[in-house]
Image: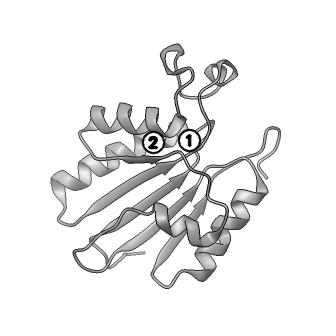
Amino acid sequence: MIIPYSNFSILQVGCGGTGGYLVPKIARLLMTLQKYRDGWQGYNIVDFDVVEEINLYRQNFVKADLGLYKSEVMAKRYGSHFGVAIGSGTEKAESWEEIFNFFPECNSGPVCRILIGCVDNNRARKVMHEAFINSDKPIIYIDSGNGKYTGR
């Protein structure tokens, strides 16, 4: 499928077990797009959790990250490493309307929004699904999260 957009606004909700490993992949993609393709790409990561010691065993964090917000750690580390701008948010989106506040804003023509869910609970999935259903702009919704013991 060919997407007829050159401007993309990417919002990733969650950057723990699944999302923390996705951030460097998207950052590398953005670096490549900026070099070889015209258009605007914005990328924000939202996660209200802080890094705890238990996270070090299965998530993409190190001891120096303990006590810091997951989204801020990921945005700084991989934005800097790949030379791309990555925004971060530490708030919790409680409604589908709030989800739209986290999308990067593009003022240079049509933009395709991409919402990536990397969460471990159904409440957050429901909010993101409602954002997908209620969007007045083109949006792609990808749910890649999981639960503690299942893919639900």
Q: The N terminus appears in which quarter of the rendering?
A: bottom left
State which quadrant residue 147 falls in: top right
Measured Cα–Cα span from mark 1 to mark 2 = 7 Å
User: Would you say 86 lies left or right of 46 here?
Assistant: left
126 vs 146, nearest the viewer: 126
Query: Would you name the residue on which mark 1 appears?
Result: 15
- Circle 1 Cα neighbour tier, 10 Å, few/some/many (<14 / 14–19 / ≥20): many
Location of residue 43 in the rendering, given as x and y in whole percent from the top left corner: 38, 54
Query: Would you name the residue on which mark 2 appears?
Result: 23
For marks 1 and 2 on the same chain, the one whose residue lies earlier in the sequence: 1
User: Would you say 135 lies left or right of 29 here?
Assistant: right
View extreme (bottom): residue: 136
Location of residue 91 in the rendering, given as x and y in whole percent from the top left corner: 56, 50
Q: Residue 104 carries which label?
A: none
Label 1: state its secondary structure: loop
Q: CB of mark 1 within 8 Å of CB of mark 2? A: yes
Q: How many labels does the image show?
A: 2
Label 2: state its secondary structure: helix
User: Would you say 69 lies left or right of 58 here?
Assistant: left
> Which residue is rendered at x = 38% and y = 64% of the image?
9
Q: Which amino acid does label 2 sit on?
A: Val
Location of residue 103 in the rendering, given as x and y in whole percent from the top left corner: 44, 63
90 vs 107, nearest the viewer: 90
- Circle 2 Cα neighbour tier, 10 Å, few/some/many (<14 / 14–19 / ≥20): many
State which quadrant residue 72 falls in: top left
View extreme (top): residue: 63
> Which residue is rendered at x = 70% and y = 61% of the image?
125
Location of residue 55 in the rendering, given as x and y in whole percent from the top left corner: 65, 25
